[in-house]
Amino acid sequence: MEVKPLLQGILDGKNSCITAFGARRSGKTQLIEGSEEIPGLAMKSFCELIPMVEEIGGSIAISCYRIYHDHIYDLLEHKEKKEDCGSRSPHRPPAVLTCGTQKGGEPNRVVGDGFGAGSLRLRAPASFHACQRPTISVFGNLCIFFTTVMGIFHFFHRQVLRSFRGILFWYMLAVISQNATGENSNSTYLIGLGSYDITGPAADVNMMGYANMEQIASGIHFRLRARAFIVADPEGGRVVFVNLDACMASQIVTLKVIERLKSRYQGLYNEQNVAISGIHTHAGPGGYLQYVVYIVTSMGFIPQSFDVIVAGIEKAIIQAHENLRPGSLFVNRGELLDAGINRSPSAYLNNPPEERKKYKDDVDKEMTLIKFVDQEWGPIGSFNWFATHGTSMSRTNSLISGDNKGTAARLMEDWFQEIHGGTYVSEVLENIEENKFPLSMSFPATGGSQVDGSCSAMHHVRSTLRKGNKPKYVSAFCQSNCGDVSPNVLGAFCIDTGLPCDFNHSTCDGKNEKCYGRGPGFPDEFESTFIIGNRQFMKAVDLFTAATEKIKGKVDYHHTYLDLSNLEVAIPSIDGQKIGRTCPAAMGFAFAAGTTDGPGAFDFKQGDDKGNAFWKLVRNFLKTPSKEQVDCQHPKPILLDTGDMKEPYDWAPSVLPIQIIRIGQFVILCVPGEFSTMAGRRLREAVKTVLINSGNEEFDNNVHVVIAGLTNSYSQYVTTFEEYEIQRYEGASTLYGPHTLSAYLQEFKKLAAALVGGSSVPAGPQPPDLLEQQICLVPPVVVDSKPIGVKFGDVKSDVPQNSTFYKGEMVTVKFWSGCPRNDLLTEGTFALVEFLQGTDTWVPAYDDDDFCLRFKWSRPWKLSARSFATLEWRIPKNAASGVYRLRHFGAAKSLFGKISYFTGASSAFVVV
């Protein structure tokens, strides 16, 4: 009697929540769920609602979830039985509720019909529109919930919701979000998002970022992705933004992606309205840029790295295009205080004191996020911009990783999937307390066997998470003006004494090699990566859930190419203005010193504005800079005069793209480099001033201007004139001389004026296409071999027989394998943790896109044709108890060049 009056309110648009709250075994389950003989409140409520809905000719959607062992399980999801590659998915008939009869004598039935995650829909006569989605203007939401007094629910091992209110909030969000609130209405744009695997070769290829020739890829921490959004307005304006889990965008990659898009879409997408940006991870395979200086350490151009990135970007954009649907965008921003520090504070302090007083920090602390809301499905993604380097993983790491921003993206996508009914172990795990030892003993190591090339993709855990026609949630953590921002927030210390490094030069006893920044998880770089990623993720969740400012206005863009090797620049001065010029590219001595995130070698040091006689002799052997170049670059002492070095082809870019994208009051400045904190502030303020003072009142002080760093091409750093004078690493890497920032300010103000004035801008000089001139010095895989009597995929080192592991422990298995360069297994996996469901069904639980599972590849010696795959699984604290095994997928090359695919699994073991 207390519940029944609430039901009419549901039909009047009100929301109701029924909660059973008590200790274990106090009768909560019986009260809410009941039994077949005595229905509980949930069943009674559904059965009361159905005839009430039928009376008014509406429809109703019901979702049922179970929170259990740190997972949300969708109890109504209908899964088909199938068998692939030795593993089966569970089968269950669709859920059916029978509640009395309809007017015509037919029983009222609610059937799980596969119409989306967790969806039950009323099956009614033909006149009843069973597939019509409920509209929020008609019905409210009913949440029926029960929890244990001492229960604790958390999504990740660092994120714990300790209060009943927190538990209730997240559960209600999971249940009612598909009937989203008013953010669904009045769609402004067409929006679409897409995501695709761009993980490059996990063996034999140098990592891009630290320029350390000894940092060679040999496995996977987690996979890299291209994430894209498309926004189109009713007037025909349309933009594409792609965020890459890569060190930076590449000019040749951008050119080739644009070529493909122009061909596929007849010019709908082109260099004007497509932006491709990198997160700046230093743990991705290199060799995909076209200029010599950026591929020296990777032994030239790596076609495999280039091809997977180009293809992945194109496929992410295709997905976004095919997902275009009416929707809205919301923007929010807030401070994140503990994810970055200034790694060159002595250079920052050289900026004018009156300018520094405008800001309370020497790095930008603001994150700006846009939220994508589909008119039908509700929230479908988010992109955010925040400045911190992708250098949580060190210069000695050899596992492919998206570093802290890739970590944040994986956390947020998994978080959204969790609260919307997804789960990676396919069903509620039953009978987990029974003795599993006899069962595990019946599953020894399988031995290697040949499989189809697509087999690993079928087992990729997240590939199965899309529900019906609902687009997959996409979250991107984009880079901004990160030039002088380090994620190693504990500061820089000498590794021999433990004392802080020298403030001005970042040296220890005059040597830079011993000065390293420390991340918050020091000395564990994986922990530091997770912590900085988690901090960005947590702030993004806050902004996402609280985003209420709707983006309104037209979609527009402007793009041009600049020749930064000789651009005339008007520079403000006391006497009015003077004319300066940019210079051909050159790198200073402090470039070779590296940074506290990854120090260089020899006797180079930051803050060197003089140079060294010995290294000048070495430099002159390659190219002696002209007096004009020396004067132009002053006070930078030139180590490499890359702008004038042309053999075997261009060493550095001269022609670079700049781009401005507008979506209503949200503006993205796309820059082809790493702006320092103050350089980025000046650029944002300059553009914002032009937009606000345009006179057409389209923009006001609420305009949101973000910088997308490392976009469309790459040209190293951009500092302020004052920071350039100090010649730390960032100033020494500002290629085009002391007036580089002034050139960008000048040209971006022109783009902004054209944007608000509706005028066009010249296309500018075209950049070169050097693809046909590229040279690769990395030898191909010749052959994979194994001992006689051994098969690829056989276990070389197994788990102990009849073993039991506890949560938090490491499980390690080694397999005979082939080189990962034989096939990148794109959208697949090299490593898999399988969970035994029932007595004979193995289901995927974790793969090489999970932080807890690492795939490591090795050879017994450098030139050996034999190789091993080592799978390391750190059992998560929230893993379900039960029987598991580790499985490896790979590809091997024969002497005649044939690629064969294989798999093998370890012996089963028990996790308790």
Image (cartoon, grey):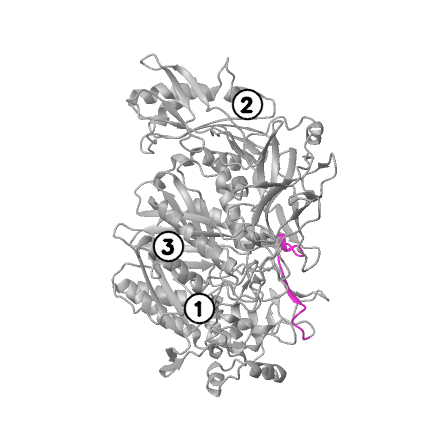
Of pointers 1 and 3, the one earlier in the residue sequence: 3
Instruction: Return the mark for residue 28.
Output: 2
Q: Residues within 10 Å of mark 3 (few under 14, many from 20)?
A: many
User: Measured from the top left, where is residue 47 in percent x and y?
Assistant: 41, 19
Query: Is 136 rendered above or below residue 457?
Result: above
Q: Which one is in front in this view, the residue at disc 2 or the one at disc 3?
A: 3
- Where 128 sits versus 491, above or below? above
Mark 2 or mark 1, earlier in chain: 2
Q: Quadrant of residue 569?
A: bottom left
In-front residue for pair 658/466? 466
The answer to whether residue 704 is visible is no
| Label at residue 240 | 3
> Residue 662, located in which quarter of the rendered image?
bottom left
Q: Which stretch is magenta?
A: 510-526
User: At which x and y percent is residue 260?
Assistant: 38, 56
Q: Nearer the viewer, mark 2 or mark 1?
A: 1
Secondary structure of the residue carrying numbered label 1:
loop
Write the residue at 64% across / 28% down: 432
Can residue 89 be seen by looking at this rendering?
A: yes
Q: CA distance from mark 2 to mark 1?
A: 69 Å
| Residue placed most toward the observer, 79 or 21 | 79
Magenta segment's dominant SS is loop
Mark 1 in CB contact with mark 3 (< 8 angstroms): no
Q: Which residue is mark 1?
A: 770
| Figure check: 306 above or below 77 | below
